[in-house]
Image: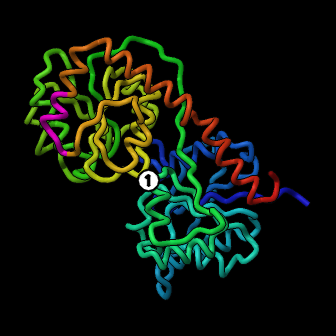
């Protein structure tokens, strides 16, 4: 008999293209490319794929007028992945009970990248307790997310495990520039407005604030005029975002919502940028002592942190080195994938 295959299921609205892939899609791609099971993994999604380094199976024709979209997508997954031994569903708790009903012999893993208390199918303790029953494993990207998942729900078999996301750790090359970088979506919850106001208040001669990411809320049109030396590059590819971080002396993670993991912060540390972060969600857990912390929405505090790093080269260098060391110790993509692969092997009885 051939070895069982693994299905990695993207949310139906998740984009898997060069310039519009979100954190979930990027993590799914990385965990496929670097896996020792790579030859046995199929990535399923509802949209187009522009990556040629992962096996992608587009699901089409699944929207049906007589069935709610979420059930129709789950049914399409069940049909397409019926011969897979392990099915890993990214961020869609409400699909798990249906998949268990339709695929009783498959191993099912829910991969949580966001707060389960804000997602359909896991908002209440009763729903999360049901997920513990129907899933064989629940991968949580941080302790913060695991704690949120288990709030009010027992897990006697220890099915909820922390599998942090990873990032490549490139060799540093080229000169750093006087750039404070932000990568990610430009939305209010990410603290972008506060970041722009803080940069204006810091009044840093010779420094630029460079932002890369989509602007669905139109923040730049309203806020860019507040500060000089601000550059918005729009939606860029992942490679372009990494190139920006590699050039930046400083990076900012100013979220005012509870970050479930903060992939952008890990990538900034990996690229050797000194990090300023807010104390929200998993950011302190992920960044440890490799960042300067500011309270969320504290514009004066962020401005002070920017001035401090801009004026103190030795502090910048210490944080840059500490960030890369933290990624090497905890989040290097090869090691991160090995942790996930260990869970996969255990679920498939191949440990």
Task: Specify few, some or many for label 1: CA neighbours under 10 Å numbering under 14, 14-19, or 20 or more.
Answer: many
Q: Position of residue 108 (x, y in %)?
A: 66, 67
Majority secondary structure in the magenta region: helix
Q: Position of residue 157 (x, y in %)?
A: 66, 66
Position of 98 compared to 273: left or right? right
Q: Residue at x 87, y 57 (%)?
A: 2
Q: Quadrant of the N terminus?
A: bottom right
The quarter holding residue 263 reads top left
Residue placed under numbered mark 1 in the picture: 144
Q: Residue at x 28, y 41 (%)?
A: 278
Q: Is residue 296 above or below residue 205?
A: below
Q: Is residue 347 visible?
A: yes
Q: Position of residue 56 (x, y in %)?
A: 63, 53
Q: Residue at x 49, y 50 (%)?
A: 142
Q: Position of residue 331 (x, y in %)?
A: 54, 36
Q: Secondary structure at mark 1?
A: helix
Q: How is the image coloured?
A: rainbow
Magenta highlight on residue 290 = no
Q: Is residue 240 visible?
A: no
Q: Is residue 248 above or below residue 256?
A: above
The quarter holding residue 201 reads top left
Q: In this figure, what is the number of numbered marks?
A: 1
Direction right: furthest residue? 1
Position of 109 compared to 11: left or right? right
Q: Which residues are magenta?
A: 297-304
Q: Residue at x 15, y 25 (%)?
A: 229
Q: Is residue 7 above or below residue 195?
A: below
């Amino acid at each position: 008999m051939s070895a069982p295959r693994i299905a990695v299921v993207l949310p139906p609205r998740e984009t898997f293209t060069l310039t519009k892939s979100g954190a979930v899609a990027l993590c799914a791609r990385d965990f496929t490319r670097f896996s020792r099971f790579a030859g046995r993994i199929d990535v399923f999604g509802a949209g187009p794929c522009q990556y040629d380094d992962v096996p992608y199976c587009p699901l089409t024709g699944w929207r049906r007028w007589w069935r709610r979209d979420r059930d129709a997508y789950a049914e399409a997954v069940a049909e397409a992945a019926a011969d897979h031994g392990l099915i890993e569903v990214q961020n869609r708790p409400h699909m798990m009970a249906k998949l268990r009903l339709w695929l009783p012999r498959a191993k099912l893993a829910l991969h949580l990248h966001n707060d389960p208390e804000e997602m359909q199918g896991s908002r209440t303790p009763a729903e999360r307790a049901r997920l513990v029953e129907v899933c064989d494993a629940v991968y949580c990207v941080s302790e913060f997310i695991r704690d949120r998942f288990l709030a009010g729900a027992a897990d006697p078999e220890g099915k909820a495990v922390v599998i942090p996301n990873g990032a490549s750790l490139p060799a540093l090359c080229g000169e750093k520039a006087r750039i404070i970088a932000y990568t990610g979506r430009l939305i209010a919850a990410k603290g972008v407005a506060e970041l722009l106001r803080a940069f204006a208040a810091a009044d840093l001669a010779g420094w630029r604030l460079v932002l890369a990411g989509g602007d669905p809320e139109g923040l730049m049109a309203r806020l860019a005029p507040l500060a000089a030396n601000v550059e918005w590059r729009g939606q860029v590819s992942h490679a372009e975002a990494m190139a920006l971080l590699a050039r930046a002396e400083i990076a900012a993670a100013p979220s005012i919502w509870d970050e479930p993991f903060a992939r952008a912060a890990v990538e900034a540390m990996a690229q050797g940028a000194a990090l300023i972060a807010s104390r929200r969600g998993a950011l302190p857990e992920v960044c440890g002592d490799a960042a300067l912390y500011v309270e969320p929405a504290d514009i004066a505090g962020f401005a002070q942190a920017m001035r401090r790093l801009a004026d103190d080269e030795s502090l910048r260098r210490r944080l840059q080195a500490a960030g890369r060391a933290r990624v090497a110790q905890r989040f290097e993509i090869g090691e991160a994938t090995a942790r996930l692969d260990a869970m996969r092997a255990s679920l498939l009885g191949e440990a």
